[in-house]
Amino acid sequence: MTLLEKGAEIYAQLVGRRNDYQITFSTPEGRRVLKDHLRACGAFSPSHVPGDSHSSSYNNGLRDGALRLLRQMDMDDEALMRLARERSK
């Protein structure tokens, strides 16, 4: 397999994964699960705990997992802002 072919294969896998995430979380049930996950992980909240580097690091780890979901979905800025506003609903 050439380098170009390998690159095309990896790209197809990434596009497929993005589509899987988008399809999964585009249903009403999927949106509820996504919002619950983002809320539980503090995706839209500050992770810093003044004077407590361990808690700050822990919160950053939780938050990173939630942000990975959003990155996988390749959401644009407008969609992210809508989701942030909806998080409390």
Image (cartoon, rainbow, N blue to C red):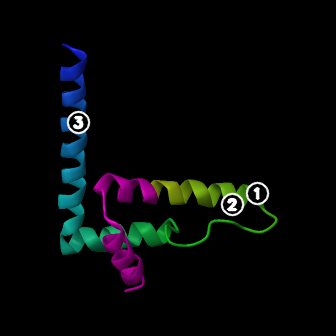
Q: Gap in Å between the C-alphas at discs 2 and 1?
A: 5 Å
Q: Split into 4 quadrants, where in the image is the N terminus?
A: top left
Range of the magenta residues?
A: 66-89
* Residue position marked by numbered label 2 in the rendering: 56
Residue at position x 38%, y 76% from top? Answer: 81
Q: Gap in Å between the C-alphas at discs 2 and 3?
A: 35 Å
The answer to whether residue 78 is magenta is yes
Q: For residue 11, which numbered disc appears in the image?
A: 3
Measured from the top left, where is residue 64 in percent x and y?
A: 51, 55
Query: Does the residue at mark 2 contact the one at mark 1 (Cβ under 8 Å)?
Result: yes
* Residue position marked by numbered label 1 in the rendering: 53
Residue at position x 22%, y 59% from top? Answer: 22
Residue at far front of view: 4
Locate residue 29: give its quadrant. Answer: bottom left
Mark 2 / mark 3, whichever is N-terminal: 3
Measured from the top left, where is residue 38 in percent x and y?
A: 43, 68
